[in-house]
Image (cartoon, rainbow, N blue to C red):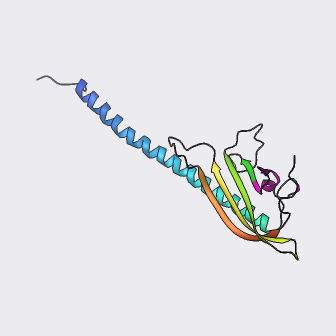
Amino acid sequence: MNKRNGFTLIEIIISIGIVSFLSVYLLQIFITAKNLNEVTYDLDNAVIVSKSVMESLSAGEKIGPDSDDIILKNARKLSDELIYTVKLGDDFQPVDSDFVDSSYIMNITLDLVDSSELSNMGLYNISVDIQREKPYFLKSSQNKEIYALNASKGLLLDIGGDTSD
């Protein structure tokens, strides 16, 4: 009787094949979990920052260098209209895009709907949206918008302040 003291070559090949087959699915699970974690982190912070900006505007903060709000202070006017942009870092704080790569872009759009002749107040449609600059890992999605908040608020007519550089 001949006694075997190890595995045969075919047993080793089959076991390596089974392990590699299972590892592909485990890797996909970890990648999906990582992406879901990033998506929820982005969404949570985008909601917090957007609501903070909306509340600051409702409280009478101006947009531009005179603002006490750090995000509104760093807002840059895109055109003659009331459209502003803020570059945000990984921690959702404003960054100087000349020195640091930004991870997110916040756009603030103000549309004057109605103004009163008797006061310096006006009704504005306010839109705050946050977009991710780079796609998520192994995703090629063209839609990079994380969150958008829209509201109509009564604000001071000179809400834009002086943002000339």
Q: Which residues are magenta?
A: 66-83
For residue 25, side relative to residue 10 (left or right): right
Q: Is residue 137 above or below residue 59?
A: above
Q: Position of residue 60 (x, y in %)?
A: 83, 67
Q: Main secondary structure of the magenta part?
A: loop
Residue plotted at (55% across, 44% down): 136
Residue 49 or 154: which is nearer the viewer? 154
Task: Determine whether, in the image, residue 81 is placed left or right of residue 67.
Answer: left
Residue 47, percent across and down?
A: 65, 60
Q: Nearer the viewer, residue 154 or 23?
A: 154
| Magenta-drawn stretch contains 34 | no
Q: Is residue 71 left or right of residue 33?
A: right
Q: Position of residue 41 (x, y in %)?
A: 60, 53
> Which residue lies most toward the left here?
1
Q: Residue furthest front?
A: 117
Q: Residue at x 63, y 59 (%)?
A: 148
Residue at horizontal 41 percent and vertical 43 percent from the top: 26
Q: Is residue 70 magenta?
A: yes
Q: In front here: 81 or 144?
A: 81
**Residue at point 74%, 38% (across, down):** 100
Is 132 in front, or is 29?
A: 132
Q: Dividing the picture into quarters, in which one does residue 66 lie?
A: bottom right
Residue 66 lies, with reference to residue 6, above or below; the image says below
